[in-house]
Amino acid sequence: MLPIHLFRQNKELVLEGLKKKHFKQPELVDAIIDIDERRRQLQVENDTIAASVNAASKNIGQLMAKGEKEEAEKLKAEVAQYKEKAKELSQKLAELETEQHDLVIQLPNLPHSSVPEGKTPEENEVVRAGGTRPDLSAQKLPHWELTEKYKLIDFELGNKITGSGFPVYMGQGAKLQRALISYFLNYNIDAGYKEYMPPHMVNYDTAYGTGQLPDKEGQMYHVTEDKFYLIPTAEVPVTNIYRDTILAEADLPVKMTAYTPCFRREAGSYGKDVRGLNRLHQFDKVEVVQLAHPEKSYEVLETMVAHVEKLLQSLGLEYRILRLCAGDMSFTSALTYDFEVYSAAQERWLEVSSVSNFEMFQANRMKIRFKDGSGKTQLVHTLNGSSLALPRIVACLLENNQTPEGIKIPQVLQPYFGSDMIK
């Protein structure tokens, strides 16, 4: 959520950022400023009345001490009128604050100055690339055929048990999932991240804190009776661990990692581009989250990008890193890097990670703050990234490492998987 002072102090910056993100209701900015001006005027009036009540109350005590009851009773009547007026003003203030809040939460985060112009994925910038593309034989198979051939995943069984987009992993397929999760977590822990195992359902306040609500309500599974939401990513519960918390400056950065299943409705996801593991309603992911000092958050972002890049390099996959254009970024992000790996059998790039800096946008909603050296309280910056999402990683590992003898397992995974080959 954008801070109110930004609208008053730098309206043009807000409008420019919203335009860059292709926000379609810039008139909300003037409405927010207008409400804020009325709210501030009422606050001044309310403060004046409060001062009058305090002064009158003091005088009443003095008059009573002197025995001047009649004068004291007159002042008491005035105080009662003041209090009634203050009650009315407080109610109006609360109404204006609610009205202002309801408008502000409709506005996305502003893009960082380095974010390129653009509206579609085709306008994203390739920052760098790495890895080697495998030279597969003409008999190469896509992962959905490989998983059937080696009995790794049963998509039809998942459809029977739940529905489309809920696969059943079995045998060596289940073992590969477990190996990847353990490797990703250990890799993050070795880099200084503290592991958490959070709930997989959250309440409204938690989903609101990270910006999933109300923006992505239609994409989340909602347990209506209990008013819980199935998490779309570990970012949601993990970042909220520090909601309503004031940290010491020395505590920053806070580094957290977690494995969770993720649940996304992905309404309207059909066709060949979402076949097999390409897009699921339930999938596994390991996440990294950091709470950083505002002056250091972009340095932290680069370290997180390098962290994910080395993880992909260790798996031997061809990858590229994209800086997303403003129109392709999420509602909450100020700057996002996407990681894609090349699927040699499908002959296309698949997104496997996003690493983002949200600056103070989430922290302002969650009231995650720290005290600096002077004792002043400031909002932290929040960052997160996939490290990594499993489905498309699995798809590329299977496709890119297929041989006539079986599917080769990357060396770093072999201690976790217990073999060098799926046969």
Image (cartoon, helix red, strand yellow):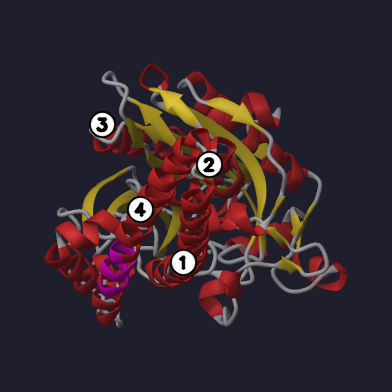
Q: CA distance from mark 3 to mark 1?
A: 47 Å
Give the residue type that dot 2 points to.
Thr
Disc 2 packing (10 Å; few <14; some 14–19; many ≥20): many
Disc 3 packing (10 Å; few <14; some 14–19; many ≥20): few
Name the one closer to the observer, 51 or 418: 51
Q: Which residue is mark 1?
A: 85
Q: Closer to the N terminus: mark 4 or mark 3?
A: 4
Q: CA distance from mark 4 to mark 2?
A: 36 Å
Give the residue type that dot 1 points to.
Lys
Residue located 40% across and 42% down the image: 383
Disc 4 packing (10 Å; few <14; some 14–19; many ≥20): few
Q: Which residue is mark 4?
A: 47
Q: Which residues are magenta?
A: 34-41
Q: Which residue is mark 3?
A: 296
Q: Nearer the viewer, mark 4 or mark 2?
A: 4
Please, what secondary structure does the residue beneath circle 4 have?
helix
Please, what secondary structure does the residue beneath circle 3 have?
loop
**In the orientation shown, which residue stands out farthest toward the right?**
161
Q: Closer to the N terminus: mark 3 or mark 2?
A: 2
Name the one closer to the observer, 281 or 155: 281
Question: Is residue 350 rendered to the left or right of residue 197?
Answer: left
Please, what secondary structure does the residue beneath circle 1 have?
helix
- Which of the 4 quarters of the picture holds residue 250? top left
- Which percent across, then down, holds residue 350? 44, 60
